[in-house]
Amino acid sequence: MIIGLLTAVAASACYGTGSVLQAVGSRKSARREAAKSSTSGVTQHGGPSLSSTAKAAVTWEFMVGTVLDFVGFGLGALAARLLPLFLSQTVISANLVITAVLGIKLLGIRLSRAEWSSIGVVCAALVLLATAAGPEGSGHTPIATHWWLLVATVVLIGGGTLIVRLLGGRAAILAGLLSGLGFGALGVGVRVLNGVDPFHLPSLLGDPALYAILVAGIGGMYLHTVALQIGSVNGATAALVVGETVVPGILGVLWLGDSSRPGFAWVAVLGFVVAVAGAVAVAWFGEPEPEPGAPQAGSPEADELPTQVAAR
């Protein structure tokens, strides 16, 4: 349990730091496009084009952030194997807190009393979850469910990407939610993946869950980048947190056999709800109302606020 918790915290730190760097790279790329008066950076619906997304992805800040994401992915995958999903995914999603605190040093952001209170709520909720968490389920499921996971992931990422591109600049919240659901599907896939323990390469390569993980990871990263380019609106990062924690947590209990300690079920439920609510509050209070004449959130001139990024 302790090793799993430490692994999840390390994954959260990697994701939180990576999100700040990715936001800086995305916004820097957007400013360059605007300075060139380029029209190739947006689609006819006002969203970022594939070329502009690719340009954002090759800035050094974004690449370093992506490396941290891969490290966080590895640590998060290990945590998903060692802890119940309602605990591992919630601890990892607490990178919103790490992002907010890191912004004090890197971006000179001052946190309001409401933000500090929200951070305290999240930390208290994580203590409740760690206290209540029991043994994780076996993760052994029929292969048919692995195929259903792959189909659902392809539909989620493929259909979601199409809808986001059609909505254009209005899709920040949806992009955040879909990326969160993608990362949640990734966590579920890691948990049920065959051929890992003990390692058996043919079983691993023949498991549809492996390809669900790849689709969810790549698609979630793309939608995450799009959300950063569009810019944050109230609830965008909150939607990501909900997608990444609520659905996997419920599936872990109902499908994979995750459980709490005897007599601590109400503590686990309370900690889970409070943690999600606190993370939503961190994202919500971290988005100030624009002053008259100030750049709107999502514009190339807007500052890179740490709690405005779609942290995982």
Image: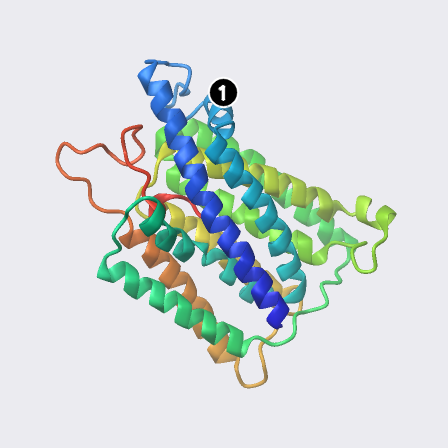
Q: Position of residue 20 (x, y in %)?
A: 42, 43
- Mark 1: give few (<14), some (14-19) or many (20+) Cα within 10 Å: few
Q: Residue at x 32, y 13 (%)?
A: 37
Q: Is residue 157 left or right of residue 163?
A: right
Task: Kindly tell me whether residue 312 is visible in this rendering.
Answer: no
In depth, the one of 150 and 310 nearer the eye is: 310
Above or below: residue 160 compared with residue 140: above
Query: Secondary structure under badge 1?
Result: helix
Disc 1 marks which residue? 51
Q: Residue furthest front?
A: 105
**Quadrant location of the N terminus in the rendered image:** bottom right
Q: Residue at x 32, y 33 (%)?
A: 298
Above or below: residue 236 compared with residue 90: above
Above or below: residue 265 compared with residue 231: below
The quadrant holding residue 218 is top right
Residue type, label 1: Ser
Q: Position of residue 198 (x, y in %)?
A: 83, 60
Q: Is residue 189 left or right of residue 225?
A: right
Q: Residue at x 66, y 58 (%)?
A: 78
Q: Position of residue 13 (x, y in %)?
A: 49, 54
Q: Residue furthest left?
A: 292
Q: How many marks?
A: 1
Q: Position of residue 42 (x, y in %)?
A: 40, 21
Q: Residue at x 36, y 63 (%)?
A: 278
Task: Kindly tell me whether residue 273 is visible in this rendering.
Answer: yes
Q: Is residue 57 left or right of residue 104?
A: right
In depth, the one of 158 and 218 nearer the eye is: 218
